[in-house]
Amino acid sequence: MNYKISKNKIIIFGKEDFNPQHILECGQIFCYYKDGDDFVVESLDKKAKIKETNLGYEILTSDTGYFVEFFDLKTDYSLIKKRLLQFEIMRNPIEFGKGIRILKNDAFEVLISFIISANNNIKRIQKSLFAIKKHFNSNSFPKLEQLLTLTEKDFYGFGLGYRSSQMVKALKQLKGENLQSWSDLPTDEIRKKLISLSGVGPKVADCVLLFGFSRKDVFPVDTWIYKMYNMFYPKLENREKIRENLLKIFGEDSGYAQQYLFYYQRSFLKK
């Protein structure tokens, strides 16, 4: 990735390996919105506006160091795409979503967001998350201690529906836990810890591992990936078996493959 840091600005040169629409609309983050032709993204207490230029993009932010890491700008995605293109199934998805980059977001923020995401749609997820932020009169993502002050009725008011009781229980389970310390554990151990939490199933756990813990040896299987798998491979009903098979096929690039396939399947093929 060819980029440089200026004062309160990250300048991206080229559009082959960075596209904010691809990055933000591929299902890995919900705290973002459009401002005219620009995208605004929020993470923890940080904010950035992404503007398209003739040469590429500009990321306008007072936290340039944070967003260099957040957008994974030090990773060469052209090499990742080259490896994945050996699989015929990846050709159209990579062409369609070539500007995808997997974000390095905060694990707690990702966990809360994806508990809300279960059997939900993006607009409702976004509405709930921004309502929670507004409740605390802040653009910052709330900390565990703040969320623990909320009741099931509060979460219903934020639009969580049946997930409200799950959220209250999950937050109590997280009390005293340090998610950052989980980063030292093997992927399978983190996955078990996540699945033990209320409202967290295999798919949500894999999403948290991929987007919150930067583990690429996972392959979240939702409805779109399930449909994709059964279009191209011998039919299977068991999603855990589908996950295992896809991990064997894509190995260390599984997380990357999942994002290209998911974005293509949901955004293009459904039309």
Image: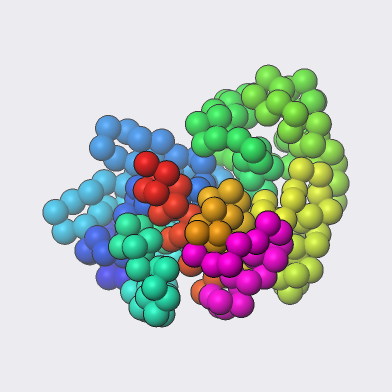
Tell me the quarter of the picture where residue 162 sits.
top right
Against 66, residue 197 (above or below) is: above
| Stretch of the chain drawn in magenta | 232-252
Q: Is residue 224 left or right of residue 173?
A: left
**Which quarter of the figure is the N terminus placed in?**
bottom left
Residue 241 covered by magenta stretch: yes
Q: Can I make out residue 27 in this image?
A: yes
Q: Residue furthest left?
A: 54
Q: Can I make out residue 61 in this image?
A: no
Task: Please tell me whether the stretch drawn in magenta is mainly helix, strand or loop.
Answer: helix
**Which quarter of the figure is the C terminus placed in?**
top left
Against 205, residue 271 (above or below) is: above
Instruction: Determine the residue positioned at 68% across, 57% down.
Output: 237
Q: Is residue 172 left or right of residue 64?
A: right
Tell me the quarter of the picture where residue 34 sits.
top left
Instruction: Determine the residue positioned at 77% across, 56% down.
Output: 194
Q: Position of residue 78 (x, y in %)?
A: 34, 74
Judging depth in this view, the residue of 40 and 195 nearest the camera is 195
Instruction: Determine the residue positioned at 81% across, 59% down.
Output: 193
Residue 125 covered by magenta stretch: no
Judging depth in this view, the residue of 177 and 20 nearest the camera is 20
Q: Position of residue 45 (x, y in %)?
A: 54, 43
Q: Position of residue 60 (x, y in %)?
A: 32, 48
Instruction: Determine the residue positioned at 44% across, 52% down.
Output: 265
Q: Position of residue 43 (x, y in %)?
A: 52, 47
Against 25, residue 233 (above or below) is: below
Judging depth in this view, the residue of 78 and 145 nearest the camera is 78
Against 187, residue 18 (above or below) is: above
Tell me the quarter of the picture where residue 12 sits.
bottom left
Q: Residue furthest front?
A: 234
